Amino acid sequence: MGLNTVDNAQPTIDQLQAGLNLSSEPNKIIKSHPTPADPFRESVYNLIPIEYIPPEKQKQYRSKFADQARREYVSGQKTAASMGPAKVFVNGTDGFLKKGDGASLKPKVKAHTPERVMRKAEVPKDKPVIIDTSKKDFIKLNALENINSSAKKPQNNTPAYRFKQDYGKTPTYILKKRQSEAEKEFSMEEMEEALMSSPQGKQQAQMMKEGLVPLPEEERGKILDGLKKNWEKLNSDYQKLSLTVDTVPKIARKVNMEKQLRQLETHIAKFSHSNILVNFNSVYKNA
């Protein structure tokens, strides 16, 4: 056996790796194997060329109405159908504007002549008719007219109150007020008489004269409920204070809240009793 010689028609390894089409058949393509990602998995079989026959292309679609549509499109064309025919002369492609052609394209306008200039109307030669001015002295005439005229009498539009129906009578609102005050006085007298009939009533009347008035039960209940709500809100705020009171503002706030709590507790204890008397005389004196 002799050495294998390389034939000119046989592809080399470089040509196979380049993927050249060396097949005699037009549709057959000879490809080389792709380079492996891992060089340690390289194989000698990858040097064998791969024959790849691509699939046949489908024929391009052509409508059966294509020739008819082409004929209709060409037969229906009109020159300048959208804008109409050109109204001015259009130069060709060679007739472009050159240097010095601008003066020839300017429109020729006649020079202004005296005949074409609009002139104003001539000044009239006849003398105007001057109307004689009046010799009346309107200032003197107005003064004389005002002197000789009589003064205008003022219109008496002031209302006559003495002719009204309720003239000199007491108004109704004053009568109603007097009646309500009289009813109050009568009811107070009746209440005093009823109180004086019993020994307990006499004591109560004496207290009323001194300015002591019993507080109604409904009002006492409302005041007590309000005091309790204030105490609950202040107590919840007091419970939320920090345990470490190490600054002056914290100490002052804590002392102030404790003082308010004690004051509210004393008020709640006072208004918890049913029999409460209010001294109005001390209130008026302090005011």
Image (tube, rainbow, N blue to C red):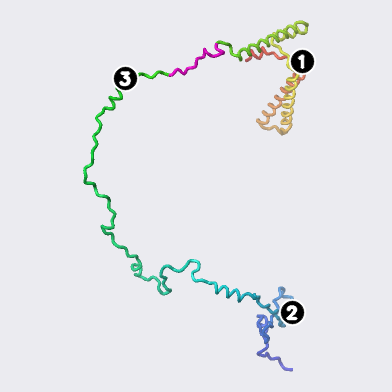
Relative to the observer, which residue lies in front, 276 or 57?
A: 57
Mark 1 surroundings within 10 Å by alpha-carbon count, few (fewer than 14), some (14 through 19), many (20 or more): few
Q: Does 190 lie within the magenta span?
A: no
Residue 257 % position (x, y)? 70, 27
**Could you tell me the amino acid type at mark 3?**
Asn
Q: Of marks 1 and 2, which one's residue comes earlier in the chain? A: 2
The residue carrying mark 2 is 43
Q: Which residue lies at the image location 50% right of the left edge and 68% below the top edge? A: 81
Q: What element carries label 3?
A: helix
Task: For the residues labelled 1 and 3, say whether their Cβ atoms are less than 8 Å apart.
Answer: no
The overriding secondary structure of the stretch rendered in magenta is: loop
Q: Is residue 63 above or below residue 245?
A: below
Q: Is residue 252 above or below residue 50?
A: above
The residue carrying mark 3 is 148
**Could you tell me the amino acid type at mark 1?**
Asn
Mark 2 surroundings within 10 Å by alpha-carbon count, few (fewer than 14), some (14 through 19), many (20 or more): few
Q: Which residue lies at the image location 72% right of the left edge and 80% below the top edge? A: 46
The residue carrying mark 1 is 275
